[in-house]
Image: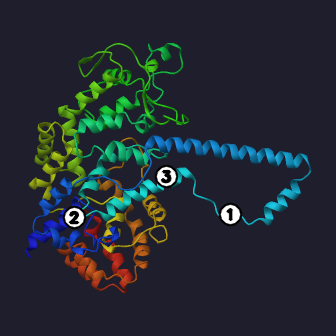
């Protein structure tokens, strides 16, 4: 087999996916379907096929909608509060009747039940498991990597709303990640999870009915982050006046109270909060047409040349290099504009551009990507009863500094080596523990299937001279070629 083809195949799997896999993690017994050898004949074609497969990015797991999850958690918390109050009432009654000692004795005599996982954590873990299963079981992983990219670009945080964070990714990101950017932008910015995360649910114009009544005031967070992070990018020509005007446009974009049993957690345009009249954003006048005023601004932002440049730069930085080749960024920006922001077309431009295949592998896998790479390479079985259950996976990811769906700020997790390189030594303990749970793994075979031609002579010698099979596997997982993409 052509060595250059194998090198390109290995590069494709690590740079654009999550690394090679033997396939058994997802229940597929065909080892070749995920290997370097299987796509060596046409690595670029394999990536394009991954994009074009039916239902790309779709999750088969039965999971609740964001609104249903919000309502369920609202009910759960109300019920828990009621139980707590009943318990306090019973305790006071017992004390008043001189029965406190008896009640305490009865409590001591009854063996305590193991605590159940609270409903909010159950919903979160179910969403996380579906996300990880999709990545670990993917043929190549390019589709999932793109979903993860867009989810980080349009990030929200479970620290602010644990109910909706997983469903938000499915509804606003996955459902639009292979269509047009304009549609994804509309879905993201009108999603209750984003409106809550960036404090728009109670934002109101000074001249709105609610504003005149003096309830609260204007909040500019959502407008500012849309301009700075989601579309145009910093230093792209917008001003503070634009931010304020856009924030007024977005007043009234809110959601129904989660306690509403029928429509809790759904998007709502509340006219009483909306600033009336026309607004000017980036020099263009937008008539005061309620919710359509905001949709019109978003539509124009989605098609702005600065948005194309911003998205192109971020995509190239994420997949190729911290400082990507300018010609690649230019190609991606042109593809974005020529296709009216078709993100699948832009992704195809990325994998067909020669500049995206530079042999230097300077991108460091983030902790979540590295964990998926390990699970794929070793075909480690993971479920509720295995050492690699979702609770353990989430704990490891958090230990390594990248808690799932909990970015440090609205700009998401950083995407450069400088942000993650200091944490690499902490991965050694994880690699040792992981390797110790796989006593039958063959490090030499995994070296060939996982890295193949990417493995340097130094890495091969280091693994060959390891003191034990476990140490050899840990060294493979910590090899520079495995840590990078």
Position of 25 with respect to 349 (left or right) is right
The label on residue 123 is 3
Mark 2 or mark 3: name the one nearer the start of the chain.
2
**In the image, which is nearer the foreground, mark 2 or mark 3?**
3
Q: Residue at x 34, y 42 (%)?
A: 172
Which badge, 1 or 2, is on the more N-terminal residue?
2
The disc placed on residue 13 is: 2
Q: How is the image coloured?
A: rainbow
Q: CA distance from mark 2 to mark 3?
A: 31 Å
Q: Marks 3 and 1: in contact by CB < 8 Å?
A: no
Label tally: 3
How far across and down, in percent of the image, does residue 406 sit? 44, 49
Front residue (pair 232, 148)? 148
| Residue 395 seen by the camera | yes
Q: Position of residue 238 (x, y in %)?
A: 27, 26
The residue that appears at 9% across and 70% down in the rendered structure is 4
Quarter that holds the C terminus: bottom left
- Vertical arrangement, residue 400 with respect to residue 235, above or below: below
Residue 186 vertical placement versus 290 (above, below): below
Sequence-first tag of 1 and 3: 1
Nearer the observer, 341 or 448: 341
User: CA gap, disc 1 to disc 3?
Assistant: 22 Å
* SS at mark 2 in the image: helix
Numbered circle sitting on residue 113: 1
Of the pair 371 and 65, the residue shown nearer to us: 65
């Amino acid at each position: 087999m052509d060595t250059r083809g194998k090198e390109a195949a290995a590069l494709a799997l690590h740079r654009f996916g999550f690394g090679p896999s033997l396939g058994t993690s997802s229940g597929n017994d065909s080892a070749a379907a995920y290997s370097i050898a299987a796509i060596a004949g046409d690595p670029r074609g394999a990536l394009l096929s991954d994009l074009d497969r039916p239902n790309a990015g779709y999750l088969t797991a039965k999971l609740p909608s964001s609104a249903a999850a919000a309502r369920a958690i609202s009910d759960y918390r109300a019920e828990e509060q009621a139980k707590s109050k009943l318990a306090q009432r019973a305790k006071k009654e017992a004390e008043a009747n001189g029965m406190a000692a008896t009640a305490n004795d009865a409590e001591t005599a009854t063996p305590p039940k193991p605590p159940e996982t609270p409903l909010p954590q159950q919903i979160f873990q179910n969403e996380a498991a579906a996300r990880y299963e999709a990545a670990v079981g993917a043929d190549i992983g390019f589709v999932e990597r793109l979903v993860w990219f867009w989810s980080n670009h349009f990030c929200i945080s479970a620290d602010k709303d644990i109910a909706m964070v997983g469903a938000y990714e499915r509804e606003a990101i996955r459902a639009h990640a292979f269509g047009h950017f304009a549609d994804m932008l509309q879905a993201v910015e009108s999603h209750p999870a984003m409106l809550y995360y960036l404090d728009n649910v109670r934002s109101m114009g000074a001249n709105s009915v609610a504003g005149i009544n003096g309830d609260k005031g204007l909040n500019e967070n959502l407008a500012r982050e849309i301009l700075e992070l989601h579309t145009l990018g910093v230093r792209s020509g917008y001003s503070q006046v634009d931010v304020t005007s856009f924030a007024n446009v977005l007043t009234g974009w809110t959601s129904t109270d989660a306690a509403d049993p029928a429509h809790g957690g759904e998007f709502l345009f509340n006219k009483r909060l909306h600033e009336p009249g026309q607004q000017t954003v980036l020099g263009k006048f937008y008539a005061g047409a309620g919710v359509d005023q905001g949709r019109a601004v978003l539509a124009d932002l989605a098609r702005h040349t600065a948005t194309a440049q911003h998205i192109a730069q971020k995509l190239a930085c994420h997949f190729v290099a911290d400082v990507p080749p300018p010609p690649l960024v230019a190609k991606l920006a042109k593809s974005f504009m020529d296709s009216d922001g078709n993100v699948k077309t832009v992704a195809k431009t990325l994998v067909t551009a020669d500049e995206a295949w530079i042999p230097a592998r300077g991108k460091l896998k983030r902790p979540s990507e590295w964990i998926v790479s390990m699970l794929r390479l070793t075909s480690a079985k993971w479920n509720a009863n295995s050492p690699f259950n979702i609770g353990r996976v989430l704990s490891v990811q958090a230990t390594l500094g990248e808690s799932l769906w909990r970015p440090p700020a609205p700009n998401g997790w950083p995407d450069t080596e400088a942000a993650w390189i200091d944490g690499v030594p902490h991965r050694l303990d994880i690699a040792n523990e992981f390797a110790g749970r796989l006593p039958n793994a063959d490090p030499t075979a995994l070296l060939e299937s996982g890295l193949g031609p990417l493995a340097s002579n130094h890495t091969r010698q280091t693994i060959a001279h390891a003191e034990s099979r476990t140490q050899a596997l840990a060294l493979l997982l910590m090899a520079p070629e495995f840590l990078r993409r």
